[in-house]
Image (spheres, rainbow, N blue to C red):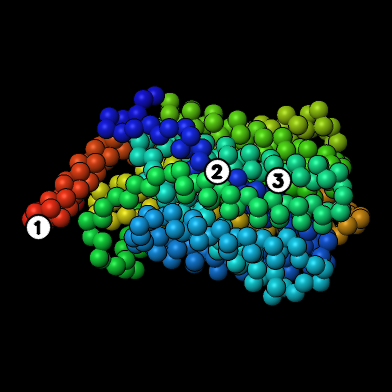
Amino acid sequence: MAASPGTQRLPLPVVGAFASTALPIAAIGLVMGVYLPRFFASQLGVSLAAVGTAFTIVRLIDMAVDPLLGMAMDRTQTRLGRYRPWLILGAPILMIATYMLFMAQAEISQLYLVGWLLVLYVGVSIQTLSQAAWGAALATDYHDRSRVYGVISAVGVIGAIMVLLLPLALKGKGGPAGSIHAMGWFVIILTPLTVLLCTLITPERVAPDARTKEHVTLKDYWALVTRPEIARLMFADFFMALGPGTTAALYLFFFHDARGYSDSQTSILLVFYIAAGLLGAMFWGWFAQRVSKHRTLIIASVGYAVTQSALMLIPPATMSLAIPGMMSVGFVSSAFVLLVRAMVADVADEVRLETGQERSGLLYALVTTTQKIGGALTVIVSFTVLDAVGYNAAEGAVNTPAAIKGLELCYVFAPVILVFFGGAAFIGWKLDATRHASVREQLDARDALAAESSLLEQTAGISLGKPPLGT
């Protein structure tokens, strides 16, 4: 579908360079959700309860940091741009924290774990928020945003696949700890390279603020949180993160202990699951251009329920069936994050039209905050439930049938219910392509008037005043 009048479809090389920073971010997100909790519990001797508590404490703190980062990004004005400096700043923070956690030795304290997890999450937040907000300014067309965020998601899948292949490439050398170390170096090396590529090639369009000198108050913040579109997106993102996030924390336990797959087989299954997301990201980005983003998310939610439930029908240790089963789940679930992010950009345009202020960073912070709440709950709730049913995560432990059954129920059916809630939030969504085209038309006209006014003031010293805000 063609772009709206007055907009330009971004060249694919620019989109690719911009999306490259998703490579290390997606890789570290996967390792944090799947491998690190087990690494701390099984290899470093930290109890499941302590690991769950540490992740929860950090995410609760990080939750309050994101809105502050978002507001700071929106008010940044430098020669490098608004969001570019933040992307550069986040790189060394991410690299240092990755080294301290992925190269950690046995018998680390819970304080050590909490401290460096917090630094890591701050680095990830800076990278994620700056890229998301920059993307909203970079791609302004309703349908082109589906394409751009689809490419970002696809590149992230490639990063996740690459980090997943490391343990297979090492062929067991160094054991589980050696695999974690290799994953850490992968992130440390790739982060500065992708940030450099992105910042040198990608342009940044900084929209003029009609009220740049006004400070954000608690009233402004609350107005955004309670805005119907944002409230829906936050609600949906929470449940769509909570559902698949539950499976991430329990993945290795489920397939190894409950379904009888070897360590190498679980890695292979995860590769297929992630790889299917590469096809899924491109498909859902294309599909959303045909039927709209909110309808696509509703369809994907139903598809997730079907494919996730079907996993229980697969006999244990049957790779020939487990591979297509995991691929179907990965394909469907890849729609959630990319389309919600694209929809936040649409809402950010409407907010800027009404208020005259750029709020992309803050809006993305609000949505990612709910996602982090969901992520925090997945670890502590899942691990607490497993403790309650008597599941023992220690290497070589023998678990009772009741404990295994509890593990299966947590992994398969809880996510289905959660994702259904997320999909239901988009019933009756109003900000479609037609409404967004009207918003962009008014924004483009106002931005053009502001640019002409600024030029006239600089050359002739004549001020035309501030352009009127949209309603």
State the CA–CA distance, disc 2 to disc 1: 43 Å
**Secondary structure beneath disc 3?**
helix
Farthest-out residue, front: 459
Q: Which residue in the protein does label 3 denote? A: 163
State the CA–CA distance, disc 3 to disc 1: 57 Å
Q: Is residue 401 left or right of residue 415?
A: right
Badge 3 amino acid: Val
Q: Which label lies toward us, 2 or 3?
A: 2
How busy is the neighbourhood of tag 2: few (under 14 within 10 Å), some, or many (20 plus)? many
How busy is the neighbourhood of tag 1: few (under 14 within 10 Å), some, or many (20 plus)? few
Tell me what residue is drawn at x 46 percent, y 59 percent: 86
Badge 2 amino acid: Ser
Tell me what residue is drawn at x 34 percent, y 47 percent: 205
Q: Which label lies toward us, 3 or 1?
A: 1
Quarter of the rendering containing residue 103 = bottom right
Quarter of the rendering containing residue 136 = top left
* Disc assigned to residue 20: 2
**Secondary structure beneath disc 1?**
loop
